[in-house]
Every structure is written in structure tokens, then in C-alpha cells.
Amino acid sequence: MALMQIAEPGGFPSERRQQMRAVGIDLGTTNSLIAVVEDGAPKVLPDSNGAFLIPSVVHYEKDGDVLVGANAQSRVLTDPLNTLSSIKRLLGRGITDMPRLGNKLPYEVEVREGGMPTILTRYGPVSPVQVSSEILRCAVSAGKAYFGSEIDGAVITVPAYFDDSQRQATKDAATLAGIKVLRLLNEPTAAAIAYGLNESEEGIIAVYDLGGGTFDISILRLTKGVFEVLATGGNSALGGDDFDRVIADWLCEQTGIGPSIDPSTQRLVMTAARSAKEDLTLAECTSITTLGWRGVLSREHFYKMIDSLISETMRTCKRVMSDANVKSNQIREVVLVGGSSRIPLVREKVNDLFGCKARSELDPDQVVALGAAIQADNLAGNRQSEDMLLLDVLPLSLGIETMGGLTEKIIPRNTTIPVSKSQEFTTFKDGQTAMSIHIVQGERELVSDCRSLARFDLRDIPPMVAGSAKVLVTYEVDADGLLNVSAMEKTSQVVSRIEVKPSYGLDENEILRMLDDSIRYSKDDILIRNLREQQVEADRLIEDLTSALDRDSDMLTKNELLSLQQSIADLRIFRAECSDHNELSVRIGNVAKTSESFAERRMNKSIQLALAGQTLEALEKG
Ligand code: ADP
Ligand code: MG
């Protein structure tokens, strides 16, 4: 237990001086916010113009100046190519995501060497990490103004579905902005903290977050003030922007503008669409004037246009509930997060699905930043109590490749993190001195159907007989969701390790596809796994018998030797051609039986040698 700090007589109250200057930052796709805890209560800090929401927009000026936030947003219409918004969609993404994202973005994106996207501005090429760091720097300047000094550290929130490389890119952006990251925190988890749900009784909580660019749903379980994330799901390409686009498409139709419009016109229509959408949250209909066209959009019509998008979020909620193994009537509270959760249709559908009234007293734009501030305050040790522990989960299983191209799951999906798991492996061949470790992510049985994360080799294993080396492989996922893998040969203590930072991100749709596939192909997968296992078994027997014959063929008569050699050759052919694991298993059994008396004779010989004073080790060395 820490010593209690006592105020010096006549000095400042020690509390004020001892406090760490910790902030919470919601680095949003559309808007970013910074919050602090003051006198035990969280609050969002205003920027120099008094605004709480910092639009996540960066503008590169002719003279090399960089504008961020509202100042940058005013250039969206006049200079779209040099005004970057929704950059979070590109953060930590690679070349494979570009066709999907590229055509949605109104600025020029190029893929550079290494497969990472770069945006071409008049300032020169800039990376999503650089752009995000400008936004973070802008947020932190509000923090510096508040404290009157540098800040000590920040908790930065990320969507629950951000993968390793997206989380790493967020950290890189913070480092570039000179910010010490205390913790990356999942946005939905931050929202639950903001509502202080950890202070109430036990129960299951759902957090529904519909922002500008992303959708997230998390199911949390609260037990004596401790949150555990039972399951999470979402879609990084679904949010208010899509509602804007639906209205914008409709506007283009109405005004008779073709699909290939220039970026400025595109933005103009998008801006009109967005304000119409926000009007419809309060009004039954709204009038729109754009590009010389005047018209009216009703709420009813708008709802028709976005119904399928909202239904998609409901389907994700159902899937995540089944992942978490909870029914809607078990969910005690639902929390609404994100500007788009203000849309009455969204609230209605959420209430219907979960069968209760969702919480919305706190500003849905602010909840995430408020929760991050509380968490930052906690981690900085400013709070007296240590009553809050946060646990997040892995979206996909992490596994390792084993013989036959099979996946062995080391940490199953939806395991709470941080987590560390070890498993022991052994060598396959006599005298094997290296082992290749292949780390994969996914639910399928075959490595080729999973996502490859990294490979590395464990070398300098002392030569031993097959199966006697003990290689301990440890998977460690830290609180930020980053994976560290190490492999150690136990007798020699040789260690090799790797930190996994995949070069590009994994989209939620890909995660969904991987999950769907694992269900769809589960039967086939089991059959293939069984066959591969028998093939490995056959290989092992062939290897064993061949090396035994190399050493001890003199124990056999000429006929026995020929017949054993023949059965090995037959088994090799049968193994290559057979596609039925049962038949292969029977054949392996037969060969093993044929070689039984040979094995017995070898066993007797080794016992005799042992009795004659030879060490087992010498025997093994042959
Ligand atoms: P993000 O987390 O992606 O940064 P926010 O939570 O800040 O996003 O939400 C921004 C989105 O919320 C935008 O698409 C914006 O148009 C939408 N939004 C904000 N206010 C309203 C409103 N009153 N009605 C409907 N949508 C709204
Ligand atoms: Mg958000």
C-alpha cells in the first residue's frame, strides 16, 4: 500500500501539486475531444474558441501552415484536396483496403512503398499517422491551456474493433505529437465508465455507439465494480457519413447532377445533406437549398433511405449478443454513444431490440472522452480507490501452425485481455535444431484459411531425438491489444521472440467473413483436420522406422528387412493418395503392427545396453 501524502503546514495543499496532469482524448473519425477530471468530476475542455468538439479535419495551407479543427473545416468546400477529414478510416490501413476506401475519400491517396497509403497535399505527401498527430496536438493544446503546462500522459480511445496495426498507428500518432500514452481504451468501455455503471450493482450492459464513421457494439459484464467485455462487434465503415451520402445521392438525383462531380460540389452536397439529416432529428421535415435547387425532405422518407443501414447495426447487435451468450432480457442497461445515436429511429430500434430504454442523459458526443478522462485519472494514480479494473477481449483467435498446416489455437477469441498463455511443443525429427513459429489469426482449422500475422525461427536447439525437446511458446497480449510471442527451448533456455505489428489492418467485414466461414466450413474443416492429423502420424511412423532401420537393420532377417521396407514404401504411397482419414489410420495401424517385433527387439537391446552401464544419453546419440 502506498504511503499517505500529508500537506505541509503553510504549503500548497499537497493534492494539487502531487496530481499528475492526465487527460482523456477521444480521437474520433468526425470529431475529437479532450477531457480532464477536476475535483473528482470529468469535464470536456473547450478549445480557444470555446468549442468542445474539435472537427477531426486538417488543412495544409499554401505557406506551409497547418490548420486543425473548425479552422480547417471552413476550407473543406474551398480547398478539398488539401483539407483532410475522416482520416481515421485510413489509420493503420494498408494497400488492400485502398480500393474500398479510396473512392469514398475526396482527396488524393497514393500507395507508397511498404504498402501504406499517403495523401498528396500541396504540403507534400502526408501519412494518416501524421494527420492524426496534428489532431492530437490540437486537442492537447486545450489541455496545456487548462493546466498551464505540459500534460503528463493521456488515455486515447480507439474503436473496439481496431486491430493491432490500427492501435499501433494510434500510438505512433501520439508519440509524434509528443504525448505519453497511458493506455489505449476501447470507446464503448469508456462510455460505460462515464455513466459510472461500475458503481451500481452487478449486471450486463450493452454499449451502442453510432458515430460519423464507425459503429461499435459491446456487451460488458459488471461484477462488483469490475467491467469485463464479454464480446464486441461493429463495422468501421458505417456511420453518420453514410446517412449523409444517402441523402447526397438523392440530392444529386433531384438536382440532375451526374455521378462524376468535382470534389467541391461533392462536399457542398454532402454539407447540405448533413445539416438536413441533423434537422430531421428534431423536425418532421426540412427544406433544403443547394446548387440552385430547393426541395423538402421528410423524416419518413429519410428513415426509408437509412432503414437498411440501421437494420444492419441491429443484426450485428444480435450476433454479438449470441457471441456473449446473453439474451436481450438479461441486459440491464443500454448506453447510447455517438452523434448519430441522436436520430430518433436509431433510439426506437435500439429500445425495441433490447427491450428497455437506452441511457442517453450524457451528451452522446462527450461520453467517450469523459470516460477516458476518468480512466486516465485512475491510471495516473490520482484516485484514492483502486476499484476499477478494465478488461477487453480479442476479436479473433490467435493460433500457431502445427505439422500438416493445421492451426492450434493458443488464445481463443473473446478471451479477455491482457492475457498470457503458453503451450509446449516438441521437435518432429531427430537432431532438429531449429523450429519455425508461424503466428496466425482466425477460427479455421487450416492455416491457409487463417490470416498470417508473423513468422520467426527458434534456432540453436540442442540436437535431440524427435519429441524430446520441450519448446514453450508463450502468447502475450497486452492491455492495448498488442501481441508478443516468445519461444523457449526448456533444457537449453534458448529464447526467440517477436512483437507482432502487421503491416496492414484487418477490416471488420473481413473479421465477419472469417467468422462466417468458420461456421460454414466447420464440417469440412474437421474432415481435413482429421486427414492431416493421420498424414502427420504416417510421416512420423515412416520417419521413425526409417531411422530405426538405419541403425538396427542387422536385427532383422533378410526377408523381414525386405518386407518392412516394402510396407514403409507402400505406406508412403498410400499416404500421398488416400483422402479418407479412417482408411489411412487403419493402414498406419497395420504397418505399426508389422514392425512390432522389430520394436521389441530394439527395446531389448537398449535395455541390455543400459544394464551394461551405458547411459541413456549415449544411447540416444546412437
Ligand atoms: P465519431 O465518433 O465518428 O467522431 P461522433 O460521435 O462525433 O462521430 O458523431 C458524428 C456524427 O453524428 C456525424 O455524422 C453527425 O452528422 C452526427 N450527428 C451529430 N448530431 C446529430 C443529430 N442531431 N442528428 C443526427 N446526427 C447527428
Ligand atoms: Mg465516436
Image (tube, grey):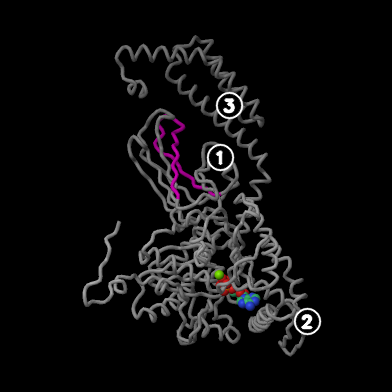
Residue beneath disc 1: 406
576 versus 605 height, above or below? below
Q: Which residue is more in the foreground, 456 or 412?
A: 412
Look at label 2 and name its amino acid. Answer: Gln
The residue tagged with tag 1: helix, strand or loop? strand
Q: Main secondary structure of the magenta part?
A: strand
Q: Nearer the viewer, residue 287 or 129?
A: 287
Count of picture labels: 3
Q: Which residues are magenta?
A: 419-441
Locate residue 297, reporting x and y percent: 76, 81
Residue at the disc numbered 2: 254
Amino acid tagged 1: Leu
On residue 572, which mark appears? 3
Is 377 inside the magenta-drawn segment? no
Q: Estimate how packed mark 1 is, as few (under 14), some (14 to 19) or many (20 or more) residues with alpha carbons within 10 Å.
A: many
Mark sitting earlier along the chain (3/1) = 1
